[in-house]
Image: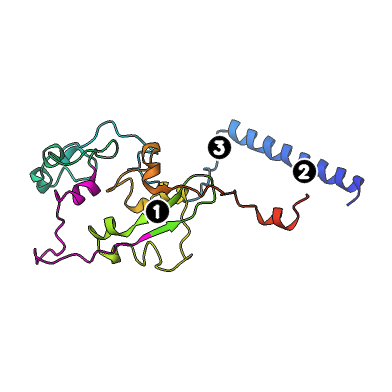
Amino acid sequence: MNQKTKAISFSCAVMMAAFMWNAQSHATEAGDKEAPLMVAEVSGPNTFNLNLKKPKSRNLPPAEDGIHDPENEATHSLQHPLEAYKGLPTSEFGNYVDWVKALDQGKLRPRWDRADPNDEPFVMDLDIVRPVKASVPDVVFPHRQHTEWLLCSNCHPAIFVPQRLANQISMSAILLGQKCGVCHGKVSFPVETKTCRKCHSKPKPADWQPPLSEATLKNPWK
């Protein structure tokens, strides 16, 4: 396309934009309603996540916590969290209870089977290390602390495919209530600046270097 053709195309585009603006202005002056703005549908954010919206208070009575149905009579029979949490080790975030420490100290013993109080959990003591490309420490996922509470089927395969390199996890997804965010920020500790190192807990090696992009590797002198 030569310069003359480009100039003609640009002029046509300017004239079309001016025409559309003029037509819209006349329609508005005539009292016509403007067409509604079309917005793409997206999944709702994780409204419980403290990184998105900080709560005004913590550990409210069940009827006032915004989670339980205050119209349900059974909600009012539930124990107040401040009473239930007495004697448990404390934390600086979430509902101020260190649930893992409470498990390790024997202050809690989750019931594994609803019908059989003597049923024992299947605990998997396996840590998964997920390398992080950025300079922050790598992520360590401890299976033990999770399987003391939950069956494997709570996470696999619906949330995480139990296969190496099969799961794409990002902070954006977590903050939107996906992957780890299905629980964290709702029923487990939230994602905030105080909790970063609870997951990013393995320091980088002393000789660690940031990875080069594929474009840089193909043409390092560009």
State the residue position of label 3.
Answer: 32
* Residue 205: percent from left, percent from top: 51, 50
Q: Identify whether 127 is placed above or below 69.
A: below
Circle nearer the N terminus (2, 1)? 2
| Chain part drawn in magenta | 98-127
Q: Mark 2 — residue?
A: 13
Report helix, strand or loop for mark 2. helix
The residue under label 1 is: 140
Amino acid bearing label 1: Val
Side of 148 relative to 41 (left or right):
left
Is there a contact, CB below 8 Å, between mark 2 and mark 1?
A: no
Residue type at mark 3? Asp
- Residue at left 73%, top 37%? 18
Q: Is residue 157 above or below residue 51?
A: below
Q: Position of residue 36 (x, y in %)?
A: 52, 43
Residue at x 70%, y 53% (from the top left corner):
216
Q: Secondary structure at mark 3?
A: loop
Q: Residues within 10 Å of mark 2 (few under 14, many from 20)?
A: few
Percent position of residue 176, x then y: 41, 48
Report how many numbered discs are placed on residues in the image. 3
Instruction: Say whether residue 44 is visible.
Output: no
**Is residue 111 shown left or right of residue 19?**
left
